[in-house]
Every structure is written in structure tokens, then in C-alpha cells.
């Protein structure tokens, strides 16, 4: 699934460029909601971030977990518009959120990886299906990057200020996938870490949250995501030599502050690793310069590769989310996801 991403991104963005004229478009003088759960919520966060940067400041953009929408915690404007994410289209909570949107009179587009009718596609007013992004793994990978790439293409078309992003993103992701050997070496360095702290801000917020989820699902280590600055205000007492602190920085200010945070983490005994746009120092990992809006598509790839390598070196299957363990299967079945 990691290696399928360059082709899926190129095919998906080309399809999104063609589909824009057939899909309902949001009105930029009304609220716009980006909705999803789990990995799909991280796609929603990335999409909302790009929309805020590409659309006028007057446009009201919100990213909400499906839970908040389904439980009525979010005040929905009937004049609004929703972009909903669900990779397989069968997440029960997201379907509930869609019903709440429909009851409030909010039109919605579903972005999904499944072309066949699903619970979510039956509720949505329109559906966009990503290309080459059907997962063969429980740990979502290509469906995430393809969904975010599709969103960038759609937003660019709706604002009439965008350009085709697919070829550039496809090349950038292919370049990162080709660096898997270096990420495997990093996995060896981090082998003793039992806890992972992922740091990100701005566009890196979605990346840090998604990376932490992949560490939990694929590497089966405890992980949490924090803001870069947030880490320096209370998290340091909880890190030690069994902790790895990994930061992703998308701007020069984030890079400078992340370096300070990682220095503090190392003094406390933790391993510290920075993924950032150039210029990067020795021992840091460079990210492709694709623009801040598009960075969530590329920046998650090193973490996907790292998680895969950690699981393999531990003798675990990274795709199964631990469901080869009967206790994990019973645990997951107990809450109906």
C-alpha cells in the first residue's frame, strides 16, 4: 500500500480535476464542514487547513470528528456544506454524522475509496471515488494520501486559484518511498522506544496525528500527538530513554522551535528525530518542498515506512492491527467498529 501511493495520487487527482464540473461546489459565503473519524478525520484536518489557506479569510471552515457531528455537539448551519471522508464507506459513526447533516439540511460530498454502494454513499448527495486507493491492509495508507490529494485538487478548482497537484505530488511521494532503506535504519535506532511522541503544528498537525495512529496500529507501540510548542509546556517530565520524540516541521519557524524541543527531549534521555523541509542539518530527514498546503500528502510517507520497518523488525505483521491476537479481536468486536 505504501508503494501504491504515487500512482494512486496521480490517478486520483486527474480524476478529481475531471469530476469538479459534475460535483456540487460549496458556496464560499457559507460555512464549510470537513468531517471524518480516525484516519478520515486526519484527512478532514488536512483538507480544512488547505481550504483556510486557499480561500478568503471570510470563509468559515471547520474540521469535525464524526462523533461530534453525530452527537449534536456541533451547531450545523443549514446553509452550510460538508465534505465527508470514509475510506470504505461503512464507518457506522460517520454514517450517523451524515444523517445528522442531512437532517440539518446540509448538502454533503463523500470522498471514499469504494465505488460500490455503501452506507455512506447512500446518504451523501454526491460521491467522489479515489483511484487506486482501495486498501489491502487494516492500517489505512493509500486511502489517506489519495483522499487528501483529491481534496487539494477539488479545492483548487472550486477557488479557481489552484493548479494541478497530482504529477508533483506523485513524484515527491515516489522519491520518499525510494528512501525506505534509510527509514529502516532509523527503525533500528528506535527499537528500544516503547512510547512515541509525534510533534507537529499547522499543516503538520494532521501528519503528527496520523503518524501517531499508524504507530499505534501498525507498530503496536503507544503513541500520542502534540503540538510542537505544546510539548515544551508539560510533556517533558513524561519522556525518558524509552521514548522517541519525532517532529515534523513545515515552516522555518516550526523547524527552529522543533529543534529546541528535540534538544530538550534528548537531554531528558529520549531519542529525538526531525523531519523537515530544507535546509536540514546532519542527522535530520529532509521532506520534499511541495508547498505547505500539500505537505500532509508527502510528510506522512516517512512515518508509514518507519512503522512498517518497526513492525517487521519486531516480527509482527504491520497490516493486521493486532487482530491475529484473539484478545485484540474480541476487544475490537466489543465496541462495534
Image: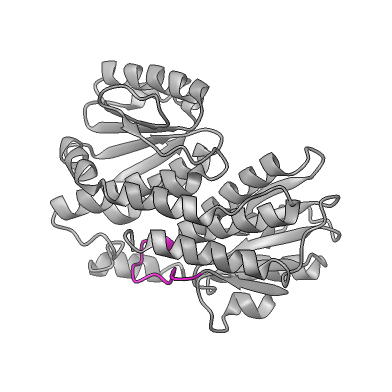
Q: Quadrant of residue 179?
A: top left
Which residue corresponds to the image point at 49% horizontal and 23% vertical from the top-left? 252
Which residue corresponds to the image point at 40% horizontal and 40% vertical from the top-left? 224
Q: Could you tell me residue 137's position as x and y percent?
A: 33, 67
Q: Quadrant of residue 196?
A: top left
Q: Quadrant of the N terminus?
A: bottom left
Q: Could you tell me residue 211's position as x and y percent?
A: 39, 46
Which residue corresponds to the image point at 40% horizontal and 31% vertical from the top-left? 276
Please state the extent of the stretch shown in magenta in the rendering: 131-143
Q: Could you tell me residue 244's position as x and y percent?
A: 28, 33
Report the front residue among 324 and 218: 218
Q: Is residue 325 left or right of residue 155?
A: left
Report the front residue among 195 and 112: 112
By secondary structure, the bulk of the magenta-drawn segment is best described as loop
- 56 over 111 or under it: above or below: above
In this view of the protein, can residue 67 be seen by the observer? no
Q: Quadrant of residue 85?
A: bottom right
Q: Is residue 217 left or right of residue 86?
A: left
Q: Is residue 159 magenta?
A: no
Q: Could you tell me residue 216's position as x and y percent?
A: 34, 50
Q: Is residue 140 magenta?
A: yes
Q: Is residue 293 left or right of residue 76?
A: left
Amino acid at each position: 500500500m505504501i508503494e501504491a501511493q504515487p500512482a494512486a495520487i496521480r490517478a486520483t487527482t486527474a480524476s478529481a480535476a475531471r469530476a469538479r464540473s459534475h460535483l456540487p461546489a460549496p458556496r464560499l459565503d457559507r460555512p464549510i464542514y470537513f468531517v471524518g473519524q480516525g484516519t478520515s478525520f486526519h484527512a478532514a484536518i488536512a483538507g480544512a487547513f488547505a481550504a483556510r489557506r486557499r480561500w478568503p479569510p471570510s470563509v468559515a471552515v471547520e474540521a469535525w470528528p464524526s462523533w461530534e457531528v453525530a452527537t449534536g455537539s456541533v451547531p450545523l448551519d443549514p446553509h452550510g456544506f460538508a465534505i465527508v471522508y470514509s475510506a470504505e464507506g461503512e464507518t457506522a459513526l460517520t454514517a450517523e454524522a451524515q444523517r445528522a447533516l442531512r437532517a440539518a439540511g446540509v448538502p454533503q460530498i463523500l470522498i471514499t475509496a469504494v465505488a460500490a454502494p455503501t452506507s455512506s454513499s447512500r446518504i451523501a448527495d454526491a460521491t467522489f471515488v479515489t483511484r487506486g486507493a482501495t486498501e489491502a491492509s487494516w492500517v489505512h495508507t493509500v486511502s489517506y494520501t489519495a483522499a487528501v490529494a483529491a481534496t487539494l485538487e477539488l479545492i483548487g478548482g472550486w477557488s479557481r486559484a489552484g493548479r494541478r497537484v497530482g504529477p508533483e505530488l506523485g513524484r515527491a511521494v515516489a522519491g520518499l518511498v525510494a528512501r525506505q532503506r534509510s527509514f529502516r535504519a532509523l527503525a533500528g535506532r528506535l527499537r528500544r522506544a516503547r512510547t512515541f511522541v509525534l510533534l507537529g503544528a499547522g499543516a503538520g498537525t494532521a501528519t503528527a496525528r496520523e503518524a501517531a495512529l499508524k504507530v499505534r496500529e501498525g507498530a503496536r507501540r503507544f503513541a500520542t500527538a502534540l503540538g510542537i510548542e505544546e510539548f515544551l509546556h508539560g510533556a517533558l517530565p513524561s519522556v525518558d530513554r524509552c521514548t522517541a520524540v519525532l517532529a515534523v516541521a513545515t515552516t522555518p519557524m516550526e523547524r527552529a522551535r522543533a529543534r529546541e524541543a528535540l534538544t530538550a527531549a534528548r537531554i531528558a534521555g529520549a531519542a529525538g528525530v526531525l523531519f523537515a523541509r530544507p535546509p536540514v542539518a546532519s542527522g535530520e530527514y529532509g521532506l520534499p518542498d511541495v508547498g505547505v498546503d500539500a505537505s500532509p500528502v508527502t510528510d506522512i510517507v516517512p512515518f508509514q515506512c518507519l512503522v512498517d520497518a518497526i513492525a517487521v523488525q519486531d516480527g509482527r505483521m504491520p497490516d493486521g492491527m493486532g487482530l491475529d491476537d484473539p484478545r485484540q479481536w474480541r476487544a475490537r468486536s466489543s465496541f462495534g467498529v
